[in-house]
């Protein structure tokens, strides 16, 4: 009976070794497949991120540098941002780009052109000149504080201020 038990034991040991090898190979295959899936997910994320960066660069060409942002955001360029971090970063970039765009609107020099409705009146021209110069000062001060204002709004504020 001992020979039968020894033979059975050897048979089970051989089967166990075979299953352990098979299990080890399956783990290696699964690990390789997992790595490949991660690579494909990163490649897919990079395509979406490149599209978003390109869209931002088109929308804000003087503020967004897609190549520079790519080094921060793209897996293919050794970046490690998660999708949530990327979305947060893009929202910040867009917010700052909007502020920069608003604050870079041209502010005229304040010189009032002579208008036909002045009817040759130096007083009307002088009043418009005061409003325009004050509007430039208001708009410049607001821009220096990072506030957005257009020139027409600044002229309205200046006219109200000078009228009171």
Image: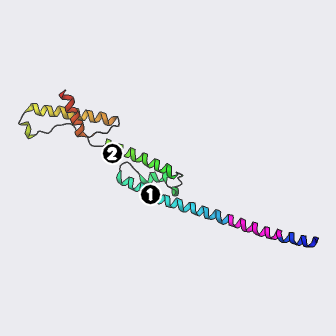
Residue at x 31% of width, y 39% of height: 148
Question: Relative to 88, does residue 16 appear above or below in the rendering?
Answer: below
Report, in whole angstroms, how far the alpha carbon at label 2 lies from the one at label 1. Answer: 22 Å
Residue 50: numbered disc? 1
Locate residue 108, reporting x and y percent: 23, 40
Residue 101 on the magenta segment: no
Q: Residue furthest front?
A: 1
Magenta region, main secondary structure: helix
Pick the residue in front: 71 or 35.
35
From the viewer's perspective, is 138 left or right of 57?
left
Residue at x 93% of width, y 72% of height: 3
The residue indicated by pointer 2 is 101
Residue at x 35% of width, y 45% of height: 98
From the viewer's perspective, is 63 left or right of 87?
left
Give the quadrant of the C terminus: top left
Give the quadrant of the N terminus: bottom right
Which image quadrant for residue 9? bottom right
Say whether residue 116 is visible: yes
Locate residue 154, reporting x and y percent: 24, 36
Residue at x 18% of width, y 31% of height: 130
Locate residue 145, reporting x and y percent: 34, 34
Magenta region, residue range? 12-27
Residue 20 on the magenta segment: yes
The mark nearer the N terminus, 2 or 1, is 1
Say whether residue 108 is visible: no
Locate residue 105, reporting x and y percent: 28, 43
Question: Relative to 12, does residue 104 appear above or below in the rendering?
Answer: above
Circle 2 residues within 10 Å: few <14, some 14–19, many ≥20:
some
From the viewer's perspective, is 34 left or right of 120?
right
């Amino acid at each position: 009976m001992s020979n039968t038990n020894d033979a059975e034991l050897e048979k089970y040991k051989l089967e166990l070794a075979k299953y352990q090898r098979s299990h080890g190979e399956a783990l290696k295959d699964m690990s390789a497949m997992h790595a490949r899936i991660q690579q494909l997910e990163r490649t897919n994320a990079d395509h979406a991120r490149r599209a978003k960066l390109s869209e931002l660069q088109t929308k804000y060409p003087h503020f967004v540098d897609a190549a520079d942002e790519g080094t921060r955001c793209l897996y293919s360029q050794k970046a490690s941002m998660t999708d949530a971090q990327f979305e947060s970063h893009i929202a910040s970039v867009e917010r700052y780009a909007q502020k920069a765009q608003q604050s870079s609107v041209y502010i005229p020099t304040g010189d009032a052109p002579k208008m036909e409705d002045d009817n040759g009146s130096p007083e009307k021209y002088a009043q418009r000149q005061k409003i325009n110069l004050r509007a430039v000062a208001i708009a410049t001060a607001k821009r220096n504080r990072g506030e957005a204002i257009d020139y027409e709004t600044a002229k309205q504020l200046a006219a109200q201020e000078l009228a009171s």
